[in-house]
């Protein structure tokens, strides 16, 4: 629970309890507990609240959360349940019935006292009594919602009722009658999931005829009341606030934290833009499972199934790391007219740099601190699913290749050499280098920041509006414009700098790590092809198992050695006997490709009966790949070529081996 105050302190109290928890098997119970804590933490973070800043006590099938008084109660009452609803829906969509979560939730606020065993106080007691109230249990049982919420009468009066954004009409009064508690509370089930209370039966009464003078008196009273309003004796009611507009912001993981903070600041401040102080929008800031998956969903026009893949709603604003990602999605959307991307300016800048230990920096960078990409021999592993990772891969490849298309002869083998040098070892230790954004490298322990001599690729962090021409929304458009202006404001640009980015004028706020340039580094006038870089890098990076089966001849053994050299640290080479059962042996070892190499005639090799494996056959004698030859038949029957390498007058064998190695590389990693 962290540091415990010695005196009574004010806290917002939130308690949750998993419905029907005790009747489940142990394994689902463990999964439910993990899912509950993950959902709570994410819901708090999505509401702009740090999970580490709240006290929480485990209650087995539930959690008690105490929120500090400097956190607005509206964030807890409105933001946390809203975020929790989405998290529970995503969790339950991927779990069977035994492991699904449905919650009862109660919120109160007041003074609490910490002691050696935990926390006590009337409001804590009230929260647990409300959690056990029959109306709450019945509401959850009668609905299909993920949770039912009950709040104290004081919370409703002080927080819910004055704020139209919380839709006070969705709360209904109930009577909580649990042990010593006998008072009114307010019940809410998301999306109207609770049936309305049954109406009381009407009493049948005989209508009494009123005398004419009574009806006349009533008419006079009504006219009089209207006159009071008309002449201003009672001011007319203020019009209610319209529901806030929803703004969904898909952001790269690189800048998710700073963008979420800035979006929530703007959301909190939105009331000053209108005369009634109405909250104008709700911001949902999220990142996809990966930048690539989110970009692919955008490229499909955000189909219904993408909600499951990306774990979020259709975005109205997209903040990727690079314009290259936007270009790739625009190409995918070229044939669509129901969705388009409107590129606005970037909101920050990050050059792609190298992080190196002092030892490595001394070897590859002269005193001016600049290096050549081709001198980076052991880069840390690169994940191209993010925009930063894609740019890092493009930077590494730029030092070795002029052509990235893996379908071009010899390119895939060169790609293998680059990707094969990556390592999972700790970066900036020894000769292991880190390729990434300037902010990430500068923040990594032991890394000295180095800038490439050819110029650094740039993460330009563009602001992209996702437009639906058939569904224009002027209110949202104003919010989108205001959001961009907010991100470009001096205050927000300072926040970007404090987070380690450069502002749009290239000013840096970095104050850690040696080597960071105060001015703008050189940048090449080039934009990588995001789709091509990812396709090439991922094709060359696939872990593979290669079966090698030489016949024992010197030529075959020498070539088999070169085949083994194609494998990288994450690949595996298995030695196989060149016998009739060689393909079954390869399948048993998990081989993706089996390479048969022979200088003499080999026995007939039937197809594997235990599975399928691709075969490349290489013969070193004339006629080794004739139509009736065993090598040819084995290759043809298993989806691969038979290559004949024969030296004539001392020429041709070397090039033939190079070509054969390209074919084997393509068979192993290209498809």
Image: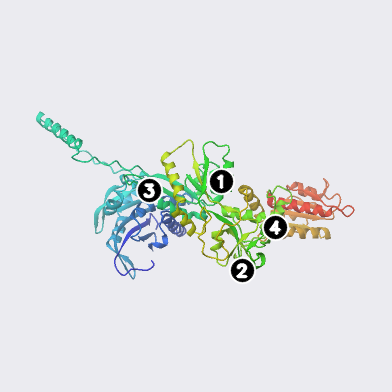
Q: Which residue is mark 2?
A: 358
Q: Nearer the viewer, mark 4 or mark 1?
A: 1
Query: Quick one: label 3 or label 1, which is nearer the N terminus?
Result: 3
Return the x and y of residue 271 as percentages of the image width and height: 35, 48
Residue pushed farthest right? 649
Mark 4 is surrounded, within 10 Å at the Cα level, by few (under 14), some (14 to 19) or many (20 or more) other residues, namely some
Tell whether label 1 touches label 3 (CB within 8 Å): no
Give the total number of marks visible in the rendering.
4
Question: Horizontal placement of 526 versus 600: left or right?
Answer: left
Mark 2 is surrounded, within 10 Å at the Cα level, by few (under 14), some (14 to 19) or many (20 or more) other residues, namely some
Residue pushed farthest top? 212
Q: Which residue is mark 1?
A: 326
Secondary-structure class at tag 3: helix
Please identify the quarter of the rendering in which residue 115 is found.
Answer: bottom left
Secondary-structure class at tag 4: helix
Return the x and y of residue 39 as percentages of the image width and height: 43, 55
Q: Which residue is mark 4?
A: 417
| Measured Cα–Cα span from mark 4 to mark 2 | 26 Å
Query: Quick one: label 3 or label 4, which is nearer the N terminus?
Result: 3
Q: Which residue is mark 3?
A: 270
Q: Residue at x 35, y 61 (%)?
A: 68
Question: Horizontal placement of 190 versus 438: left or right?
Answer: left
Mark 1 is surrounded, within 10 Å at the Cα level, by few (under 14), some (14 to 19) or many (20 or more) other residues, namely many
Query: Quick one: label 4 or label 2, which is nearer the N terminus?
Result: 2
| Measured Cα–Cα span from mark 2 to mark 1 | 36 Å
| Measured Cα–Cα span from mark 4 to mark 1 | 29 Å
Tell whether label 2 touches label 4 (CB within 8 Å): no
Q: Nearer the viewer, mark 4 or mark 2?
A: 2
Query: Quick one: label 2 or label 1, which is nearer the N terminus?
Result: 1
Secondary-structure class at tag 2: helix
| Measured Cα–Cα span from mark 2 to mark 3 | 48 Å
């Amino acid at each position: 629970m962290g540091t415990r105050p010695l005196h009574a302190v004010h806290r917002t109290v939130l308690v949750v309890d998993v419905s029907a928890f005790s009747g489940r098997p142990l394994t689902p119970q463990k999964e439910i507990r993990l899912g509950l804590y993950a959902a709570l933490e994410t819901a708090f973070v999505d509401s702009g609240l740090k999970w580490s800043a709240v006290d929480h006590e485990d209650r087995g099938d539930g959690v008690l959360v105490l929120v500090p008084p400097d956190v607005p109660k509206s964030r807890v009452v409105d933001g946390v349940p809203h975020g929790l609803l989405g998290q529970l829906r995503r969790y339950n969509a991927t779990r069977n019935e035994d492991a699904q979560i449905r919650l009862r939730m109660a919120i109160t606020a007041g003074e609490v006292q910490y002691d050696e065993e935990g926390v006590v106080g009337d409001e804590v007691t009230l929260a647990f009594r409300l959690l056990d109230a029959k109306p709450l249990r019945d509401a959850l049982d009668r609905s299909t919602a993920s949770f039912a919420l009950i709040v104290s009468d004081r919370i409703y009066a002080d927080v819910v009722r004055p704020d139209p954004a919380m839709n006070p009409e969705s709360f209904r009064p109930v009577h909580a009658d649990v042990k010593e508690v006998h008072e009114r509370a307010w019940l809410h089930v998301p999306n109207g999931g609770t049936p309305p209370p049954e109406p009381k039966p009407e009493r049948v009464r005989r209508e009494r005829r009123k005398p004419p003078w009574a009806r006349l008196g009533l008419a006079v009273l009504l006219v009089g009341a209207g006159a009071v309003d008309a002449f201003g004796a009672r001011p007319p009611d203020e019009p209610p606030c319209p529901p806030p507009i929803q703004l969904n912001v898909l952001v790269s993981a690189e800048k998710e934290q700073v963008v979420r903070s800035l979006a929530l600041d703007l959301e909190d401040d939105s009331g000053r833009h209108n005369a009634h102080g109405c909250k104008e929008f709700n911001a949902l800031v999220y990142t996809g499972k990966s930048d690539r998956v989110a970009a692919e969903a955008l490229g499909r026009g955000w189909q219904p199934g993408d909600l499951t893949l990306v774990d979020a709603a259709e975005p109205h604003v997209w903040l990727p790391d690079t314009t290259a990602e936007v270009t790739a999605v625009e190409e995918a959307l070229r044939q669509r007219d129901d969705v388009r991307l409107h590129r606005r300016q970037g909101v920050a800048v990050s050059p792609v740099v190298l992080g190196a230990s002092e030892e490595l920096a001394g070897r590859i960078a002269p005193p001016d601190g600049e290096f050549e990409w081709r001198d980076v021999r052991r880069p840390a592993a690169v994940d191209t699913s993010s925009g930063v990772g894609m740019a890092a891969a493009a930077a590494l490849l730029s030092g070795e290749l002029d052509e990235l298309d893996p379908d071009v002869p010899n390119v895939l083998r060169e790609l293998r050499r680059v990707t094969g040098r990556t390592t999972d070892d700790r970066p900036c230790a020894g000769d292991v280098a880190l390729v990434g954004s300037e902010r990430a490298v500068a923040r990594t322990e032991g890394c000295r920041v180095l800038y490439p001599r050819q110029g650094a690729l740039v993460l330009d962090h563009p602001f992209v509006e996702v437009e639906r021409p058939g569904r224009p929304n002027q209110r949202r458009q104003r919010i989108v414009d205001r959001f961009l202006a907010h991100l470009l404001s001096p205050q927000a640009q300072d926040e970007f700098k404090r987070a380690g980015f450069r502002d749009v004028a290239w000013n840096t706020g970095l104050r850690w790590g040696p080597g960071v340039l105060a001015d703008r580094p050189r940048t090449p006038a080039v934009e990588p092809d995001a789709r091509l870089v990812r396709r090439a890098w991922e094709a060359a990076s696939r872990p593979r198992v290669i079966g090698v089966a030489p016949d024992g001849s010197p030529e075959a053994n020498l070539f088999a050695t070169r085949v083994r050299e194609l494998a990288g640290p994450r690949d595996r080479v298995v030695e196989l006997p060149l016998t009739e059962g060689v393909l079954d042996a390869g399948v048993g070892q998990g081989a993706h490709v089996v390479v048969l190499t022979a200088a003499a005639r080999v026995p007939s090799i039937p197809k594997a009966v235990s599975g399928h494996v691709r075969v490349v056959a290489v013969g070193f004698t004339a006629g080794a790949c004739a139509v009736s030859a065993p090598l040819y038949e084995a290759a043809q029957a298993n989806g691969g070529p038979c290559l004949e390498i024969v030296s004539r007058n001392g020429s041709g064998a070397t090039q033939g081996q190079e070509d054969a190695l390209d074919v084997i590389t393509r068979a192993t990693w290209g498809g």
